[in-house]
Image: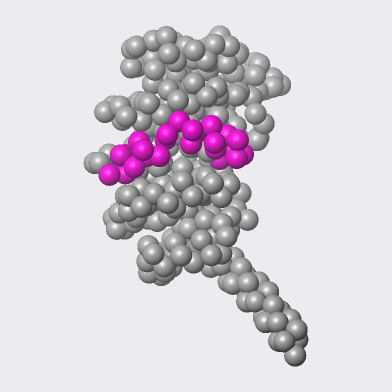
Amino acid sequence: MFTLVSRGQTSTRNLFQLLFSSHKYFLNECINLDYQKKTEFLCENGQIMYSQSLKNNEYICFQNKNLLSLRYIIYLRKQPKLLFSVEDETQIMYACWGLNYLSNNDDGQQYFSIKPAVVQKLTLLLNSQNESLIIPALKTIGNILTGNDVQKAKVLNTGVLKPFEMLLSQNYSEVIQREVCWSFSNIVAGTLAQVNQILKNDSLLKALFRQFQQGDSKIFKEMSYFLSNLINYTDLKIIDQFLTQYDCFQKISTMLDTEDEAIRRIILEGILEFSKKKQKFNHIKSKLMQNFRYISN
């Protein structure tokens, strides 16, 4: 089975390493502090803003007393309603990056529980025309979807699939479309009811597979996770019908021809799992036929 990870995002550890490499003072003062104390210390002694480069999806960290991102992390811990109490888009953006940071912990511990009302607010922000708001909101939603089935349900209950389809159908940046595809790959690792919310939505799936036609390797990678997770976590009968209906065998063949070794590996793991399920099904079918003939005789 695949381990779902917050790929393409800066981990807590890497964030601190980037900062410490430039600021020895922080290293000396923070080295022995735990996660929460470290975060509080950084907020008191220097504001840190990490912003996304749309070109390479990396983060840049720098010290600036006028930027509020990590201060919002502390505020959001204590008062999640902060996201509802401001109208300035810049402040909302920093709040969303704070939520993204809190929901993306590399050590797997749950430091911060995002309330349903906040998740609903994040979903509403996906309808914005401002990509600077959409991106951190979308990344935070994606982080939550890497969680357990309850956390996935918290997101799906906001009606997030409708704005997802809109983001795929309109002319948004490749970063946004890739993040939506990544979110889908995590949803199909959920319960059957959660998976069916995607598989029974024909217009959504058509919007998803239109991204495949772009031929972008980063989109291919998210598609490979989507198909492989679907095969791993879903019943064989459902998989068979889906793969045939949406011509997925041709898409799988195309991805196997890419030069990206990671994409080929993910797809091959999915094919192997599909083959195992087929063999198991055929074995059970053979046993049933033998028993039937035995009873008939």
- The image quadrant where one finds the N terminus is bottom right
**Most distant residue in the left direction:** 171
Tell me what residue is drawn at x 39 percent, y 17 percent: 92
Q: Looking at the image, is 76 positioned above or below residue 127? A: above
The percent position of residue 240, horizontal first and vertical second, equals: 49, 66
Up-down relation of residue 295 to residue 224 (above or below): below
Q: Is residue 147 magenta?
A: yes
Q: Which residue is drawn at 64% across and 24% down?
A: 111
Query: In the rendering, at what x and y percent does residue 286 appear?
Result: 67, 80
- The percent coordinates of residue 39 (x first, y second) are 59, 18
Magenta region includes residue 77? no
Q: In which quarter of the image is the C terminus?
A: bottom right
108 is higher (above) or lower (below) than 290: above
- Which residue lies at the image location 42% right of the left edge and 35% below the top edge? 160
Above or below, comparing residue 223 to residue 281 in the picture: above
Which range of residues does the magenta coloring cover?
146-169
The main secondary structure of the magenta stretch is helix
Is residue 146 among what the camera can see?
yes
